[in-house]
Amino acid sequence: MLRYLSTRLVRALLTICFVVTFAFVILRLSGDPALLILSPDAPPEAIEAFRKSWGLDRPVWEQYVRYFGAIAEGNLGRSMRDGRPALDLVLERVPATLALTIPALILKLVIGIPAGIYAALHRNKLADRMTMLFSVAGFTVPSFVLGLVLVLIFSVNLGWLPSGGQDSWIHGILPVITLGTAGAAVLARFTRSAMLEVLGQPYIRTASAKGLAWHRVVVDHALPNAAIPTVTIVGFMVGSLVAGAVVVESVFSWPGVGRLLVVAVANRDLAVVQTILLFVAATMVCANLTVDMLYGWIDPRLRTRRVAGAG
Amino acid sequence: MATVTDDRIAADPTAVGPPRSRVARFVEAWPPSVLLALGWIVAMLLIAASVEWIAGYAYTAMDLRARLSPPILFGGTERHLLGTDELGRDVLSRLLYSIRMSLLIAFFGTLIAATLGTFLGILAAHFRGWVEDIVLTMIDFQASMPFLIIALAVLAFFGNSLILFICLMGFHGWERYARISRGLAIAANEQGYAGAVRQLGAPAWRIYGRHVLPNIASTLIVSMTLAFPETILLESGLSFLGLGVQPPLTSLGNMVGYGREYLTRAPWIMLAPSAVIVLTTLSISLVGDWLRDRLDPTLK
Amino acid sequence: MNAPAAPLLQARDLSRSFRVRRSGGMFGHAAVLHAVDGVSFDLTPGRTLGLVGESGCGKTTTARLVLGILTPTGGEVRFEGAPVPAPGTRAWRQLRRRMQMVFQDPLGALDRRIPVGQQVMEPLAIHGAGARGDRRGRALELLDAVGLGASFFARYPHELSGGQRQRIVLARALILDPTLLVCDEPISALDVSIQAQVINLLLDLQAKFGLAYLFISHDLKVVRQISHEVAVMYLGKIVEQGDPDRLLTDPAHPYTQALVSAIPVAAAARRRPRLILKGDPPNPVDRPAGCAFHPRCPAAVDRCRVDTPVLKPLPDGRLAACHVAHGEAGSARLVA
């Protein structure tokens, strides 16, 4: 178990290093970082100072080391639009994003998982087919289309709900529904196939053949085993809480991290983009690590699993 | 309890019913939904191939006397069947050109991703050791980051051009092909035909080109079909945000993004491309699922 | 039969170990598995050496070492006097023309998508042997040699029976005129009725092409039919080696005795008491000290627990690695 966790931890650190390297490489490939991170019309002495402080006059490998150092200190550059530290800009947008993505995550879990389990237990029945239809639609209707259609119906035609902005909780209803619907569809489909896979296993047949009540078979044997793959996808959803609303925030003019990212990309405000990239990577890695620990807890095989075999 | 037991019997796929008619068997092999989906895909491909001849107007042609004209059944004229936009451009013609653009981008993107992923997967399977470790780390990284964020970062750093954009789409989902091809190639090398051919003295290009690739092709083609709608959605999402295909070129997502400004006054600008996106991705998904069930039940 | 021909294949003190991770404990720990441990033998052209033992005794590893698919961790293999080159090199690929392999699972060894005739021709294309136009004719010759007609050329592997597939694998292995054929359990996946046919075919082919076989099987009876010499392996070592008939009628090593007693005999008069071995074959990672066989050996004495016996000649010329068989145990043989 310790070994399992330590390899996961090493892998998580590796992934972070990978993202930092990725950011460094594209930053270097895309031109003079001083001109990109600051702005081309920044005063020459500022550019010179930037070059010195980031060590741009040094060899590439040293720059790489310094880059790591700067990021470790939280020095991620300043936004070229208003000159404020990029990290502050990003952090102050996080609550708005979470205000959308956490209710949406709850919506996904509350709809998606029960729907998937129900569909698997009633395979090929009407309920199953309806669930699958809903989930295929969730896959194929892009969130911006769903969002705009909801706006068209509930804001433009019916006038019940506001179409954008963040003035009250009512403004959050449409974006949360938009986000939650697509995610619930993904989760329902995933849970259903995980359940079906488990229900087809010999131990389930054994359990029901030995006379165990069917609901006990499901609760004691099928659900815990189906939970293992489902946890992965939920972990991915948790990991994308910060960045999962890029499109939806833009549709509803919601001032979160996603909207900040889109605006920053459009303006090529690289310090902000880079900060969001690293921030998202960090949350993803933390979420994955948590999922791995949960695995160890849910799946007893992982606690003792060893690599066996002789070449 | 009794009903539950019935469920399980009904769920048994091997249960044999009474002999069925030829029509029933045909419907089972070719479900109507799949036929409809195939029909829609064929129509889209025909449009993409012949857009110059069937579009009534150039996609940039403006008709300033007929701005924001509604579709024909909603009070518009037969000159613009799906209406016009703020600049008087014909929505139908722009839609047809957008279909071609979106399909082309998704096609090349999927092709690049499949080529790249398969190559890396086979590389990992062939060399094992540290090469495999690097490929696996890259797979983990790609699978653990939302691709939209990576794509946005690359667009921010490199700016935008159509070629760069297509290449970017080519990095979407490569890790799936890499996983599949690595797994299948390792299996083939260790106990199967590939090991036997290697033992005959065949060089690597022959083992993979003549034997492994043709054997895993059906699996890869099914994965490509399943990945294609995702690439369309990614392209249209980025274009919707104004960060994908740039005007004056037009794609489906681009049109939706533009039409959003006129949601109140001219919803048809946004609804027409939205419907095409949904129907196209739905059709390809249906065909992909059907292909998977027929060709490769191992891919679930 | 003991004409001093130059050996085609020489294995000298051949060893191969694998690193494995063991279960147990909090972390598990690395261990070394000695799959093959100090195996030596010679094989002269046109002859057959049978290699017998339970699954996991190192037979298949030995085969892969001989073919150079695996590199030995100790000792060496010489083929026609020269060491076998490293796998994947140009020299190694060239050597495939001289040594070939027949697999246990013929369906797995064939590409399901390609007609079998094409697959029989493939070695010619790989090695650029013969004119392009002659290859088909050559493949048909080989199909004929393994008892399949020209009508099989265009068929696919799944359309053939197990025995027919194995004939295809044989034809493909023989098309380059090799001098050594390594057969790894070539008949154990086949129906019993087909096994004899394939054995007879192998004997015919040996007579016709002058092939040498390294024939690997877990079945002593089959090995006896085809081999000029038999080596019995137990946990990575050869424990007894010699003439197959002598070995079967009067096995010297207690392990061979157990194997022989397990062969079903038809005539009741010849029935011998069946020797049932105690326990399972031990895990090769946990090799017992001394003679590896002593925990299961009905004749084991104290010396067997500490002193590893060496493979050396018995008075009749056969080789055995057993203190008891050599009369060095300090007590009489206890075996019935």
Image (spheres, helix red, strand yellow):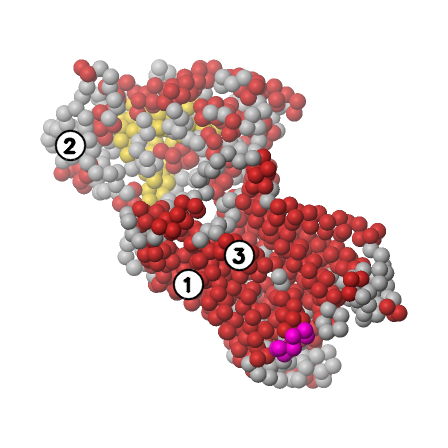
- What residue do we see at 59% from left, 79% from top? A171
| Residue hosting label 3 | A130
Q: Disc 3 or disc 2, which is closer to the eye?
A: 3
- Give x and y (percent) for residue B188: 50, 40
- What residue do we see at 39% from left, 22% from top? C195
**Is residue A120 located in the magenta-colored stretch of the structure?**
no
Instruction: Decide if residue B7 is on the left or right side of residue C300.
Output: right
Assign a secondary structure to mark 2.
loop
- What residue do we see at 72% from left, 51% from top? B44
Assign a secondary structure to mark 1.
helix
Identify the magenta region. Answer: A156-163
Q: Is residue C329 above or below residue A16?
A: above
State which quadrant residue C83 falls in. top left
- Give x and y (percent) for residue A241: 52, 71
- Give x and y (percent) for residue C178: 50, 24
Mark 2: few, some, or many residues within 10 Å (few <14, many ≥20)?
many
- Which disc, if any, is residue C299? 2
Q: For the C terminus of chain C, which image quadrant?
A: top left
- Mark 3 → mark 1, Cα distance in angstroms: 33 Å
Name, please, the residue furthest toward the right: B65
- Which disc, if any, is residue B263? none
Q: Is residue B4 above or below residue B205?
A: below
Q: Disc 2 or disc 1, which is closer to the eye?
A: 1
**Is residue A162 located in the magenta-colored stretch of the structure?**
yes
State which quadrant residue A310 falls in. top left
User: Looking at numbered disc 3 in the image, what kind of residue is underneath it?
Assistant: Met
Instruction: Decide if residue A270 is on the left or right side of residue B17.
Output: right
Q: Earlier in the sequence, mark 3 or mark 1?
A: 3
